[in-house]
Amino acid sequence: MPRVNGKGSDMEKQSSAVMSEAFDPLSDCEGVIELAIPTVTRPYRARLASAVISTARTSGYRVNVVAYQDDYGLSANDYLETRRGACDGMLLYLVGGDEVNASAFRQPFPIVCLGLCPTSGNVDQVLADNVADARNITDLVIRKGSRRLVLLGAQREFDGRSLDESVRSRGWDRVRGVLEACREHGIELDPRLIGVTGYEWTIGAGYSAMKRVAASGVEFDGVICMDDPLAIGAVFALKELGRSIPDDVQVVGFDNIYDAAHMVPSLTTVDANLEWITGTAVDLLARRMHDPAGEPLCFQRESPILLRQSTR
């Protein structure tokens, strides 16, 4: 699969060069895009849905949002294999653990995946570079003085040193990035400092996992959380434990949800890059609607870090 991978203006120039060959203005027509997403109750997914609707409207499309897990209790694969109804194209958001058969992608309309897709050779993808993003934020925390790190939000227990390379998801790619940064600095994660939350990346899960890790008695001075709600929960727990942030413990998250900028202390986080992701995905889907031929493409970019009060 051809990949366009980079950050900043270089990435934008490359993606523009690839896409501009086939894109036509859509302001004089209206089509229907379906956004298929497991749920819109999580902060990141709600913001993603809102950004897709706004971006598509600007391009002359309207969006039907289907929460296939919440609305129908279906996996992505089962929804694709049983769905009915017309649309001109689909933006599909998958979560960790979603497995989609290649046959399920054989629809009478094009599909672009928002995020990592296990059957990556069969479908277009637009995604953040979660490995690089996690490596960068972990490197920042280490360079600012923290070396005894907590990893909060692992989906299952592991030894803190290595991962099965065949296991891919947004969450595990972030874990990979954390491990890469630790190796670069000669740091090994203590398994007792890994907070397992399964697929529950919520404030409550972050609070509970942080309390469990602290109860282990192992010293720590930095907390890398797999998303912002986990980080917010961790901050609540640390405050109850009398730990000063960032003097005693630095805390960081991912996705830059609204609350991250307004809590006390405000949270250093990796931006969700939603404007780029949704803009690129809608443009790529528009290209496929006009001309479905060609190899699947993958567009990927690193996200900026937003420095706030939870780091030194």
Image: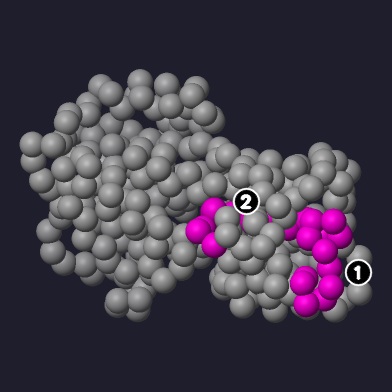
Q: Quadrant of residue 236?
A: bottom right
Q: In the image, residue 35 lies at what x, y percent?
A: 28, 57
**Residue drawn where x is 74% and y is 74% of the image:** 237
Q: Quadrant of residue 55?
A: top left
Secondary structure of the residue carrying tag 1 is loop
Which residue is under mark 1?
A: 218
**Residue 174 in sight here:** no
Mark 2 Cα within 10 Å, few/some/many (few <14, many 20+)? many
Report x, y in % for residue 210: 75, 72
Does 3 lie within the magenta span?
A: no
Instruction: Answer with left or right where residue 306 lies relative to residue 70.
Output: right
Give the residue at mark 2: 269
The quadrant in which the N terminus is found is top left
- Find residue 112 and report its horizontal and vertical position in percent: 32, 47
Amino acid carrying mark 2 in the image:
Thr
Residue drawn where x is 38% and y is 69% of the image: 39
User: CB under 8 Å between callouts 1 and 2?
Assistant: no
What distance separates the C-alpha of mark 1 from that of mark 2?
A: 25 Å
Question: As rendered, which of 68 and 309 lies closer to the eye?
Answer: 309
Magenta residues (range): 238-259
